Amino acid sequence: MLGFLQLSVRAGVVVLGALLLSSTVVTAQPSPTVTRLLDRARAAAERGHEGRAWALIGRAVREAPAGDESGVTALAAALPTEVAEPTSVWRQRAAETRDAIDAFLEAAPAHADLTRLARSRSWAAALAGDHVEAIERAAGSAGLQDRASADLLRDLAALSVVRRDLHAAQRALAAAHRAYPQDNEVLADLGAVELALGRPGAAVERFGRILGRQPADFDARSDLAGALVAAGRAAEAVELLAPAAAHYGDAHPELHLELAYAALEASNPRVAVTAARAAIAVLGDDDARGHTALGAALAASQQRDEAESTFEEALRRDPRDVRARQGLEALRGPERREPSRGVGRALAAP
């Protein structure tokens, strides 16, 4: 997990009208006027005239005959698909798209299959500012084994994270999991959000399920170990990581590092020292992480002088290593006369 929360993002940026203007699904044959307007909008978008293209699509919506969804589908296709906070211009356009789809859905015949358009409506509403309402709609209409709805809900969750609304993200991901329960990426996102919400027990269950499905998934193993530590079950994290580090640590040195810090949390500095030294043996000469972990483990083992020199070596390798600098300052600070076990524990959490 990187940054605020690393939720994997499925979508990228779609240039205005580039994908779906030419592949709309309609419930009535588009009129020549609508087809001509959409062709002109596509050409304007290709020339970089975004505002002109948007105006032409809006005109196509107004002039479309009853039952022709090509215009509103083009509006939806023109919206950004990047999971990021949109500009004020795109928030306004998203609101216009939401309203246009609402009007079309209200007038559509009862037998029409408008599922995809309804999903587009949810994304437009979210971009316009109401991601909570969008999640409720998308969750309410999602079916079983509904991959498309699960993908939409996952994107809505990512947008909720951007907006610092973790509770909404959790609801979206829980609904995505119900719609497509075999998707491990959804489970991983859900575990990450639950961990950020202070629910490590729930996160343990999510990551444990992924690891049960894919025992060789090192990311899932690391996520589960982190959740176990957060849940106060560091000894279990050590048991989980130790065999993996022994077998795969040379190729994946992060396993040694994670084991070292989990062992510190479990008040087992002996294992932490061994794991940190194993990490140093396989990391590059310019990589300070192993020495930083070893410094913390030595401090927890009451080997103050060795810990200081190890932190110094870490800073020689990487002067920007904040954890090594904090460890060295703690050892040399006013509390120098105090036992140094607390220094190692303070630096244990990743």
Image: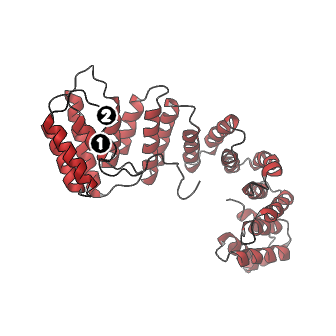
Residue 12 in the image, given as x and y percentages of width and height:
43, 50
Residue ID at (72%, 57%)? 254
Q: How many numbered circles are shown?
A: 2
Q: Would you place residue 262 above or below residue 294 in this image?
A: above
Check residue 281 in the rendering and tell me which mark sits there, or answer none: none
Front residue of 32/73: it is 32
Residue 342 visible, this orientation: no
Q: How far across and how far down the image is residue 321, in percent?
A: 66, 72
Residue sitting at x 30%, y 50%: 16
Q: Which residue is most to the top?
A: 111
| Earlier residue among tags 1 and 2 | 1
The residue that appears at 14% across and 35% down in the rendered structure is: 32
202 to the left or right of 10: right
The amino acid type found where label 1 is placed reads Ala
* Quadrant (top left/top right/bottom left/bottom right) for the C terminus: bottom right
Residue 111 falls in image quadrant: top left
CA gap, disc 1 and disc 2: 8 Å
The answer to whether residue 258 of the structure is visible from this angle is: yes
Q: Position of residue 345 (x, y in %)?
A: 74, 62
On the image, numbered disc 2 is attached to which residue? 117
Give the residue pinned by disc 1. 76
Color scheme of the displayed model: secondary structure
- Residue 286: name its quadrant: bottom right
Say whether marks 1 and 2 touch (CB < 8 Å): yes
> Residue sitting at 72 percent across and 39 percent down?
215
Q: What element carries label 2?
A: helix
- Amino acid bearing label 2: Leu
Horizontal relation, residue 82 to residue 195: left or right: left
Q: Where is residue 308 in the image (x, y as percent from the top left)?
A: 79, 76
In-image side of 46 versus 13 (left or right):
left
Is label 1 in a helix, a strand or a loop? helix
